[in-house]
Amino acid sequence: MAGKKKDFVVSRRDFFRKGAAVGAGAGLAAQAPAQVRTGRIRFDQVADVVIVGAGASGLPAAIMARDHGATVIVVDANHDIGGHAMVSGGRVPLGGGTSLQKKYGITDSADRVYLDHTDHRNREFRFGDRDLIRMWADENAPTFEFLIENGVLFNDVPPTIVNGGTVPRLVVAKPFSDNLKETINGSPGSGLVRHLEASARAKGASFLLRHKMKRILRESASAGRVLGITATHDGKDLNIQARRGVIVATGGHTANVEFRRMFDPRLTEEYQTAGEPWSRWRRASLLPWTLEHRSGLHPMSLTRSVIPSRKQYISVVDMATAT
């Protein structure tokens, strides 16, 4: 069994709370004060935490940041929230001893999850980063309960086995509503992201849709502390200061041709990703220092945890549901 690295994961409480100035009406504080100057950069909006991507990674990150007292701005290039998860099948393979597993008499543990997802005989998992998988396995059950606590509803049926595992873990979210526009043609994935969106908004997170991240702002061009991001909207740039950190939750790595060909050279440009524009991938050339994120986990990656790039002070989260 791989040992757990104590210094790999930053404390979520420390990340979100240290230095955060939050009082009554904290949700509105995420957009003020405007036109703040930090060195030579003029910021138009300010928040403790700026999250890039409003999908199945960014939404939980926004909720957790607000739960820890941080002001939050979520930026997404699309006209709606949800990302790839919006048009997914809403399949969430989380185990480790969830409440639904226990209800149906299924015995599971974080150790069993880890072993199943580091099985060298499974070609989808053999290249995974063992440290990330260990952390992800430990977070399986807490993440499932987090989803329940924030309104996500799953079909009340026994979980099933998926991905060559040894224990039933796969559950499916219920579509958010009967409104085909609201659910993007009845997608079960809507039952995941719409409830998370509602929770994030109710807790005070602010959303900037149709805002595409253009660059990450740092103390110098390619080094130093991260200060925030520049986003574009209607042809205009908007600088957003992040007092505590930037969380990159853009996901969509299956549309990254270079990345996926690391695992299977046959997956060239002619193989496209379904679900545009919700599943459109944001080019990683903007984030060359986040390549520690190459965990190789499929079809789900990291969940609730916030994972820092140890050298560059950028947090990366990716929780993608299966298709």
Image: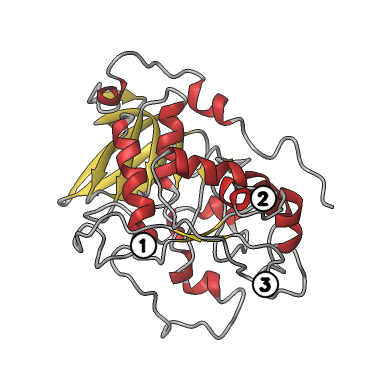
Q: Tag 2 or tag 1, which sits nearer the N-term?
A: 2
Residue positioned 68% across, 45% down in the render = 138
Q: Which residue matches tag 1?
A: 188
Horizontal placement of 77 versus 59: left or right? left
Task: Tell me if residue 183 comes above or below residue 240 in the rendering.
Answer: below
Q: Nearer the viewer, residue 142 or 282?
A: 142
Mark 1–mark 3 distance (CA, rounded to whole Å)? 23 Å
Residue 5 position in % (x across, y down): 76, 41
Q: Secondary structure at mark 2?
A: loop
Residue 160 in the image, given as x and y percentages of width and height = 58, 66
> Who comes first in sequence, dot 2 or dot 3?
2
Report the Cα–Cα distance between label 2 and label 3: 16 Å
Q: Nearer the viewer, residue 247 or 190?
A: 190
Give the residue at x 22% y 25%. 34
Left or right: residue 3 compared with residue 172: right
As helix, strand or loop, the secondary structure at mark 1 comes to: loop
Query: What amino acid type is highlighted by mark number 1?
Result: Pro
What amino acid type is highlighted by mark number 3?
Gly
- Residue denoted by label 2: 96
Q: Is residue 138 left or right of residue 228?
A: right
All told, the count of numbered labels is 3
Residue 164 is marked as 3
Amino acid under disc 2? Gly
> Which mark is first along the chain, 3 or 1?
3
- Whether residue 69 is visible: yes
